[in-house]
Amino acid sequence: MKKYLVVLLVLTSGLGFSQSINDYKYAIVPSKFAFLKEKDQYRMNTMTKMFMEKYGFVTYFGTDILPAEVADQNCNKVYVDVESHGTMFMTKLNVVLKDCKNNVLFTSAEGKSKEKAYQIAYNQALREAFSSFDALGYKYNGSVTSVETVVVKTTNDGATIKKEVVPVNANTSNGGAALFAQPIENGFQLIDSAPKVVLKIYNTSVKEIYIAEGNQGKGILYFKNADWIFEYYVGGKLMSETFKVKF
């Protein structure tokens, strides 16, 4: 009976908060969690970022140089925290999403692990905590907009002001042609019909998330809405490409 009650509480809390969560496109993950001693210790912050991206948020570290559309407003993003409530016999973690005023928007179910090795225990508990995001059913409800650069020009006397808005689209789609996965050590290489190696991807501990590298740069490849998304940085800006992949 207790088990069913816990599941019901997670589902109702997810439904109760989903409307406000869906208003947010971006998420910020800190470089260090309060219960750990070092930045990205046990790769907890990197894993948290990967999970947030898996569930649909455009996610940055708090130390990243942010695009203008993200940085210009403090309240257009959720702030992610992981809290530890464990004992010496069990690791217990919750994922908490807050707004810019520190209001709690969502708290995950408690992830648990009895493993003694910290890295394994934290990894298992974090996975279990994030599994309750399935019930959250997040989907951004706003329209997708491109970053815009505004150039302001004035005359010498300051009397005339002209504004030019130049759209910059950081997202590209390569969904027309499929890439084919060929096994390599610790992962796959993705080739096109030429055949040409487009990306090399390497396994992580998270299903459907890979470390990826190509001519564009290094980043991550993850599965979302029947597509594979390759995200990487160029000159401090997050770039995104969409692929179809046949394994």
Image (cartoon, helix red, strand yellow):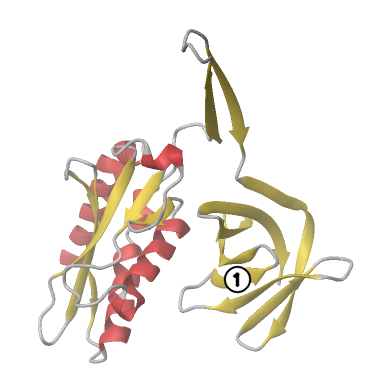
Q: Residue at x 22, y 86 (%)?
A: 114
Q: Nearer the viewer, residue 231 or 226?
A: 231
Residue 35 visible in the picture? yes
Above or below 88: residue 134: above
Residue 225 visible in the picture? no
Q: Which residue is mark 1?
A: 212
Q: Residue at x 21, y 70 (%)?
A: 93
Q: Quadrant of residue 168?
A: top right
Residue 125 as seen in the image, left or right of residue 218: left
Residue 77 as seen in the image, left or right of residue 57: left
Q: Position of residue 105 (x, y in %)?
A: 23, 45
Q: Among all residues in the image, which is located at the extreme top?
A: 159
Q: Among all residues in the image, which is located at the extreme left?
A: 87
Q: Among all residues in the image, which is located at the extreme front?
A: 156
Q: Nearer the viewer, residue 110 or 156?
A: 156
Residue 78 as seen in the image, left or right of residue 241: left
Q: Position of residue 210 (x, y in %)?
A: 55, 72
Residue 83 as seen in the image, left or right of residue 189: left
Circle 1: residue type: Ala
Q: Residue at x 29, y 37 (%)?
A: 75
Which corner quadrant holds the C terminus? bottom right
Q: Position of residue 237 (x, y in %)?
A: 52, 51
Above or below 118: residue 226: above
Q: Quadrant of residue 7?
A: bottom left
Q: Residue at x 29, y 39 (%)?
A: 74
Q: Position of residue 172 (x, y in %)?
A: 67, 47
Q: Among all residues in the image, which is located at the extreme bottom?
A: 116
Which corner quadrant holds the N terminus? bottom left
Where disc 1 sits, the SS reads: strand
